[in-house]
Image: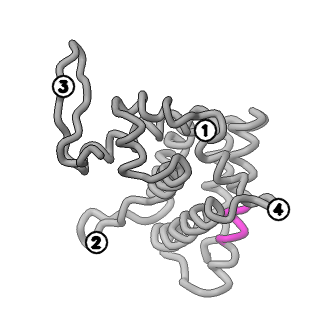
């Protein structure tokens, strides 16, 4: 078996470039992100994943075990949010920051439509429990972020309202990316105005 520290890739011109374990893993993830963003999981083969990463199927299995484990890792990374800056270190809150947050998020969704639609699909009965768990963790992270950005009271009822709001978010995103009945700008306006209405006056 190829050692992760000695694996190599082929650059333009046929020159072989050795990558360390972290670089190789990142390269595989990047290739997988591109494929899973554009196509459903079932239509992507391990051969295509290896080719997209500029590596071999042996390396693919070495780092991630199976195609499914690689897919779940892509979803986990997709659902992560950057950490908030510490207090007094450029941390922004309020409506303007909320507007920027949703704008950045919608840009990411636009580049990864199949990924988010796969995650949204996990709310359906009989959905994949592992994908559902990843989606649930991502929603919890958003719950924390929205409370912090709008400086909302961290109370049970407020969190329940945000979870209800997240259900509307999933529907709005599906209407935009899946059916085209809403535009990106309309989704942005809907999300920001609805969430701001939850903030105590």
Q: CA distance from mark 2 to mark 4?
A: 40 Å
Residue 137 place in picture, x, y as percent: 55, 68
| Nearest to N terminus: mark 1 or mark 2 | 2
Residue 67 vs 14, above or below: the answer is below
Residue 125's tag is 4
Quadrant of the snapshot with the C terminus: bottom right
Residue 174 appears in the picture as rendered: yes
Residue 121 place in picture, x, y as percent: 72, 52
Residue 92 vs 48, above or below: the answer is below
Q: CA distance from mark 3 to mark 4?
A: 48 Å
> Does residue 165 show up magenta in the picture?
yes
Q: CA distance from mark 1 to mark 3?
A: 34 Å
Q: State the residue at coordinates (68%, 84%).
A: 157
Span highlighted in magenta in the image: 162-167
Tag 2, which secondary structure? Answer: loop
Q: Nearer the viewer, mark 2 or mark 4?
A: 4
How many residues crowd around disc 2 within 10 Å: few (fewer than 14), some, or many (20 or more)?
few
| Nearest to N terminus: mark 1 or mark 4 | 1
How many residues crowd around disc 1 within 10 Å: few (fewer than 14), some, or many (20 or more)?
some
| Nearest to N terminus: mark 2 or mark 4 | 2
Q: Look at mark 3 in the image and give the residue it sits on.
A: 16
Question: On the rendered structure, is 111 left or right of 63?
Answer: right
Residue 45's tag is none
Q: State the residue at coordinates (55%, 83%).
A: 153
How many residues crowd around disc 3 within 10 Å: few (fewer than 14), some, or many (20 or more)?
few
Q: Look at mark 2 in the image and give the residue it sits on.
A: 86
């Amino acid at each position: 078996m190829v050692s992760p520290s000695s694996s190599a890739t082929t650059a333009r011109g046929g020159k072989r470039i050795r990558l360390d374990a972290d670089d190789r893993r990142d390269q595989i993830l990047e290739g997988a992100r591109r494929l899973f963003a554009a196509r459903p999981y079932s239509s992507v083969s391990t051969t295509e994943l290896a080719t997209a990463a500029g590596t071999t199927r042996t390396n693919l299995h070495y780092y991630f075990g199976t195609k499914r484990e690689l897919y779940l890792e892509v979803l986990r990374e997709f659902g992560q949010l950057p950490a908030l800056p510490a207090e007094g270190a450029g941390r922004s809150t309020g409506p303007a920051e909320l507007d920027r947050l949703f704008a950045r998020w919608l840009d990411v969704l636009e580049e990864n439509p199949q990924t988010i639609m796969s995650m949204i699909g996990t709310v359906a009965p009989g959905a994949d429990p592992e994908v559902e768990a990843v989606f649930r963790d991502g929603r919890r992270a958003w719950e924390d972020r929205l409370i912090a950005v709008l400086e909302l009271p961290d109370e049970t009822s407020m969190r329940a309202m945000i979870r209800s709001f997240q259900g509307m978010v999933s529907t709005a995103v599906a209407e935009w990316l899946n059916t085209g009945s809403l535009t990106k700008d309309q989704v942005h306006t809907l999300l920001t105005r609805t969430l701001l209405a939850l903030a105590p006056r």
